[in-house]
Amino acid sequence: MDSVLEMSWIWVGLIGLYCGFLLAVFLWKRRLFVATWREPYLADLPLLLESDDWGPGGEHHAQRFRELAQTLSRYTDSMGRPAVLTADMVLAVPDTRAMREQADGVYRRRFLDTDFPQIHQAFRDAMKAGVLVPQLHGLEHLNGDGLARLAKQGDPRVQPALQEDDWWDWESLDSPLQGHYVDGSALPTTNLEQQRQSDLVDQALTVFQRTFGFPSRSTVAPCYLWDDATESAWAQAGVRYIQTAGYRCTGRAADGRYVQDPPYLVPGQRNSHEQIYLVRNAMYEPVDGRRADACIRSIREAQRQALPAVVSTHRYNYTRAEEEHRESLAGLERILCACNRFSPRLRHCSSPELGAWLEEPGRDLVNPANGSRWPSLAAANTPGHINGWLWRLWYRHAKLRGLVVFSGLIAPLWLLERVTTLLKRPART
């Protein structure tokens, strides 16, 4: 009898120690647990294709874009809506002939709507068809004043571009020179003054309205380089949603390294201006080796976490070599097919639509490019919320994941995940 009692007390002690351990973990990560719980969770799987650097281009760009738009139109979601490309637009490129002939150190532009009619019309047609929602990337994908200064100095980094009168692949410009809200003509980069940034943003949004007929409510900075002054300028000009890669870079250091501040952002997080951050969590950049299979895995991870799946896929994947273009379209089709297979709740939408939903959950989705209206996204029910919360903690925090495995806590959490998976909001029929 005494031995049984002794064993009972041992078990009570072990259980007490384990409960104490769990309490210590909770107190240690309480703020993280609470903050993660308060994030938005979705029962639907919104699929966004965010594609930077579209804008002025050679004649072949228009044909390549039309083929991309046709591909998107063939894949519809659970509501019958076709896939949508949020194309973050560059509105102008340098007028190299004028800059070369004048040689006075003044920057001059050629605009998408006035100097590149073929691709501008291709964009307008895709907007009408509902497969394109343009948004602002920048007035151009470089710092104009810095480029003009380097041109006057005869800097070899810009001379090849300045010799081309018609079209040049500006995404192949020396990387530090491609920042828009920073001057990267020398490292470390220099952030532009508040007033200069405000002038650039105001001019860009005026040109955007003229070019596409509606205002841009979301944006992403060229090269992900922006700072507090940029956000203030965007806010004053009516930009509500900021597309990100999950962090903000305020500049580049002397060694070219990107300086991240803050280094980590989550979907729906707000800044001091109450602007909402959107986060890209899947990459489809096949020219850089980030191919369809890896993108599909990332989309599945987003689905487990009850997150929107936001895919980064830049223009150059579709506008350089013909073979790369064909392979990129084929891979995109694989992604869209896979999403339709594994998600009966797939929803296609654009960045400003997702941002508006995060700002006001329950509102219908309204395509700003053609005015079409679609039912609201469905938020996760309680089991789906718990399930997504567990997966977010698992994927985001390696140390916490290791602790869960080492402590054996993974067993009850696995059981909880299985139960909440079964109780999540049923599939739409």
Image (tube, rainbow, N blue to C red):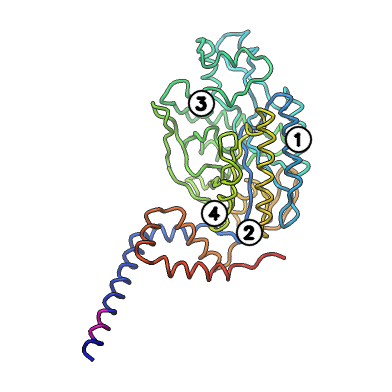
* Residue type at the position of mark 1: Arg
Cα separation between marks 1 and 4: 31 Å
C-alpha separation, residue under disc 3 versus residue under disc 1: 28 Å
Q: Tell me the kind of residue under disc 4.
A: Glu
Q: Helix or strand or loop: what does disc 4 sit on? A: helix
Residue 175: which disc? 3
Magenta residue check for 8: yes
Question: What residue would you read off at disc 4?
Answer: 301
Considering only order in the chain, which callout, 4 or 1, is on the residue closer to the N terminus? Answer: 1
Residue 51 in picture, x, y percent from top left: 62, 38
* Secondary structure of residue under mark 2: loop
Residue on which disc 2 sits: 44
Question: Helix, strand or loop at disc 3?
Answer: helix
**Can the viewer see residue 165 in this picture?**
yes
Mark 2–mark 4 distance (CA, rounded to whole Å): 14 Å
Q: Quadrant of residue 16?
A: bottom left
Mark 3 and mark 2 in contact (Cβ < 8 Å)? no
The amino acid sitting under disc 2 is Asp
Q: Which residue is mark 1?
A: 66
Query: The C terminus lies in which quarter of the figure?
Result: bottom right
Question: SS for tag 1?
Answer: helix
Q: Residue at x 51, y 65 (%)?
A: 386
